[in-house]
Image: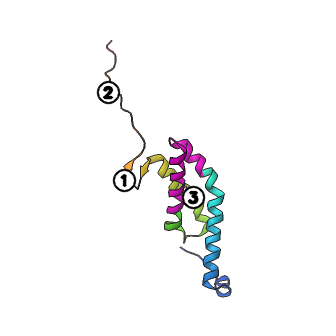
Amino acid sequence: MLMFNAEWVLCCPPKERALDETRAMDRFLAEVERRAFRIALVSVRGRDEALDIVQDAMIRLVRTYGARPSEEWRPLFFRILTTRTDTGYDPATKTRTKEVTVDRTPPPAE
């Protein structure tokens, strides 16, 4: 449920509130970007893929949960990020990006 401060709503015009919310989201994303990149880098093959994952997580947070209270952004963002890194799912290609190696050699005979 979206909470708001009635005094703030009365004193600030809508454009100012939207600008404040945008600035708050920008500050939040700047706060988490380094940690998010390190988490993604450990989980995937390379730097470019890690950057793509972090960017995708940021975009998803802004588009899907941007209107939520700022206290909820951190857990939501890291849930989006870890889901993306754990599954290796690439929404652009609708495929899994992580490789799975299956060893099909028979076990040694005893």
Instruction: Measure the C-alpha gap from mark 3 to mark 2.
Output: 40 Å
Quadrant location of residue 42? top right
The residue singled out by tag 1 in the image is 94
Circle 1 packing at 10 Å, graded few (<14), some (14-19), many (20+), is few
The residue singled out by tag 3 in the image is 75
Q: Are marks 2 and 1 in contact (CB under 8 Å)?
A: no
Compared with 30, 37 (above or below) is above
Disc nearest the viewer among 1 and 3:
1
Location of the C terminus (image quadrant) = top left
Q: Residue at x 54, y 60 (%)?
A: 58
Say whether residue 98 is magenta: no
Looking at the rendered structure, the secondary structure element under dot 3 is helix
Instruction: Measure the C-alpha gap from mark 1 to mark 3.
Output: 25 Å
Residue 59 position, x and y percent, is 51, 62
Disc nearest the viewer among 2 and 1:
1
Q: What secondary structure is the magenta-colored segment mainly?
A: helix
Work out whether mark 3 precedes mark 2 in sequence or the reverse, and give the earlier one: 3
Q: Residue at x 60, y 77 (%)?
A: 18
Q: How is the image coloured?
A: rainbow
Instruction: Report how many numbered discs are placed on residues in the image.
Output: 3
Residue 80 numbered mark, or none: none
**Type of the residue with mark 3:** Pro
Quadrant location of residue 16? bottom right
Compared with 23, 85 (above or below) is above
**Type of the residue with mark 2:** Arg
Residue 104 numbered mark, or none: 2
- The magenta segment: 36-60
Q: Are marks 3 and 2 in contact (CB under 8 Å)?
A: no
